Image: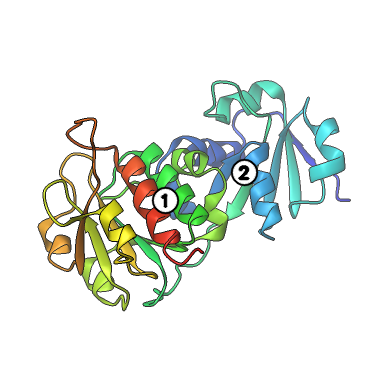
Amino acid sequence: MTLPLHITSRDNPLLKDLRRLATGNTDYRKQGRFWAEGDHLVRAALARGVRPSIGIFSESNWPLALVEYAQAAIKNVVFSDALYDTLSALESPARMGFVFDLPAAPQLQPGAASVVLDRVQDAGNVGAILRSASAFGFKQIIALKGTAALWSPKVLRAGMGAHWGLQLIEGADLQQVQQLSVPLLVTSSHRGDFLHQSLLKKALPMPCAWAMGHEGQGVCSELEALASQHVRIAQPGGEESLNVAAAAAICLHASATVKLP
């Protein structure tokens, strides 16, 4: 095992870069790498064979991490607890994290079950949708411009490890959506068949692509015009609308169950 590098200076360049990755939304694009903090995210990555480039540990955590994580990354860095706390964005720092190289931008797969994110801006919503997509077999995410940065720390935490099993396309436009060969389904509060009725009639296509829109404005008119099918979610309780992440979970689960016995 290569001995870890111990860093004690607040002016260390790596520490400054890590702070930017840990607190910024899009700094990962500039650096070509991203920061994932905590045991759960690291375990999820390793379980899928994704190897980090740098392991980052607090001084107090390093002895505990030796057994399980010392061989995970190409190299390891140990910060004093005080310095580690300055880069952590968590209320209770996890005392460990990893730097991963940003994956190369994937090619769009026209026939893949997909989720199209249209200006979904809340990082928690985006991460939750990624988690539902992974759970229900929608492996391609097409994020249109204006959507929260997919590899930002907040989206990573909300995704709970889903990133590692998905093909993530950022900064997409409508021309890329038009390349899809699967039906595009769009939710609406006032238009289309009710989801549960379509499910009972087996009228939900699979594979397909679900479009999820901006928290306040919904799906833009240009994207809606590309829809093969409009679907409504019944709300017998009388609420005006659903949170976009909740709506996505309902829709993706419905599609995933179409071919189940």
Q: Nearer the viewer, residue 1 or 116?
A: 116
User: How was this image coloured?
Assistant: rainbow
Of marks 1 and 2, which one's residue comes earlier in the chain?
Answer: 2
- The amino acid sitting under disc 1 is Leu
Residue 38, which numbered label?
A: none
Report the residue marked by disc 2.
41
For the point 46% across and 34% down, the residue is 23
Secondary structure category for the residue under label 1: loop
* Quadrant of residue 183 within the rendered picture: bottom left
**Residue at point 34% right, 52% down?**
251
- Whole-percent x, y for residue 64 in the image: 83, 32
Please state the horizontal and vertical placement of residue 170, each as a whole percent of the image.
Answer: 36, 60
What is the number of the mark on residue 150?
1
Q: CA distance from mark 1 to mark 2?
A: 15 Å
Q: Name which residue lies at 31% across and 79% down.
A: 181
Mark 2 secondary-structure assignment: helix
